[in-house]
Amino acid sequence: MIYNLVIRKFFWTVMTKNRFLIAVITFGLLVGCNDSQKTDSTGKSEKRIARMNRVSALPLKVKSPKDNPFSKEKADLGKLLFYDPVLSGNKDVACATCHHPNTGYAEFLDLSIGPNAHGLGSRRRFNRDNDIPFVKRNAQTVLNAAFNGIDGNNRYDPSDASMFWDERARSLEKQALEPIKALEEMRGKGFSEDEILNVVVERLKEIPEYRKLFGEAFGTDNAITIENLAKSIAAFERTLVTNNSRFDKYMRGDKDAIHISEKDGFELFKSVGCINCHNGPMFSDYLPHVLGVPRNSKLRDIDRGINDTFAFRTPSLRNLRFTAPYMHNGSLTTLKRVLEFYEDISNGKERNPDVPAEKFDPFVRELKLSVKEMSLIISFLNTLNDDEFDKKIPEDVPSGLSVGGNIN
């Protein structure tokens, strides 16, 4: 069974990534494993394949791209930019508006509310006169985004790391600019997507403190550029890591870090099939999967996912305490409902009329969950929470605008 799951996973990767040469090589290796499985009665080959789905503690150190080495000056600048609404079209939204430390650098909303609004997290509302739509997808936490793309062997390339539900950006540097350009996230209606980044750069150049901070961070005159804006924010985001959860301590040798029921939940997590997609130190394979998640009625248009396939990238399971509601559109409010959803689709029940059961990812057909197993798995998932992260909010930002945007 494990072999079949790996083959299915392999073909999905090939179809979505179009990496023919790697496909040929990998398929040869997998066939070799299958042949040895047929002739090896000890099951060693099956164990060898199962290692592909292993989990581990997060690394203690964070990598940075070669063209954006870490510096404290750069990260400190990035933090100010993260909280400064000067980056938004109408100067009313900051990165921190939807990724605030008080809500685990995510927010307790199904779909984010960007420009022309007020409030923080679940209290955020559009202003009375509004024609800005909801953000299309649920805001993922920034915590541990520095490790995006990491595999079971702790290998990852920060310059080519998967970002967003649809993988439309590869690296924190590229990710940092996308919300600024998006109408419903930060840009608003005052500027076009093509001009907003240049507008923001010109604003920053007019602020003496930013001219000074960019110069110190990058060691050059005229350092305020689109590229350096992205590098600064990415440098700050790489400081937002939680790599010392109880699970991390357990995997590093502290066998008392998690309780017996949580250990039972961990074994169930593996045996029922959750680990097929939620693996590696971040509990994500960083691959797209078709699940047929229920619609969110707030969205006027159908979200068809990656390449109109209704596939979305596997999210991390770390810090789920801070990231409810769940799934790409926030349609499932609790972890229990998430597991009940998986039970439904594993039995062929369709929860989204646009996604018939025959399109479901093959992995979900292997899931077999009972109510008792759900509670134990949820207990295990709670060991992945870690609230030791930077919660200090700047007292002010160089623009003089409200810290975090219009969140009061």
Image (tube, helix red, strand yellow):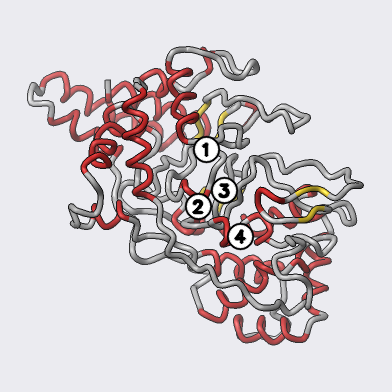
Work out whether 226 lies above or below 291. below
Q: Residue at x 47, y 37 (%)?
A: 287
Earlier sequence position, callout 1 versus callout 3: 3
Looking at the rendered structure, the kind of residue marked 3 is Gln
- Which of label 1 and label 2 is nearer to you? 1
Left or right? Give the position of 308 relative to 205.
Answer: left
| Res 279 → quadrant | top left
Q: Residue at x 56, y 81 (%)?
A: 73
User: Where does label 4 land, which residue?
Assistant: 100
Looking at the rendered structure, the kind of residue marked 2 is Ala
- Which of label 3 and label 2 is nearer to you? 3
Earlier sequence position, callout 3 versus callout 2: 3
Residues at marks 1 and 3 touching, judged by CB atoms closer than 8 Å: no
Earlier sequence position, callout 3 versus callout 4: 4
Packing grade of label 1 (10 A; few <14, some 14-19, many >=20) is: many
Q: Calculate the distance from the C-alpha at mark 3 to the C-alpha at mark 2.
A: 15 Å
User: Where does label 1 land, which residue?
Assistant: 313
Looking at the rendered structure, the kind of residue marked 1 is Arg
Q: Residue at x 60, y 27 (%)?
A: 310
- Which of label 1 and label 4 is nearer to you? 4
Packing grade of label 3 (10 A; few <14, some 14-19, many >=20) is: many
Q: Secondary structure at mark 1?
A: strand
Q: Calculate the distance from the C-alpha at mark 3 to the C-alpha at mark 4.
A: 11 Å
Looking at the rendered structure, the kind of residue marked 4 is His
Q: Position of residue 161 (x, y in %)?
A: 50, 52
Q: Calculate the distance from the C-alpha at mark 2 to the C-alpha at mark 4.
A: 22 Å
Q: Is residue 158 visible?
A: yes
Using the image, tell me which numbered label, if any, was put on residue 161: 2
Q: Position of residue 232 (x, y in %)?
A: 61, 71
Q: Position of residue 254 (x, y in %)?
A: 19, 57
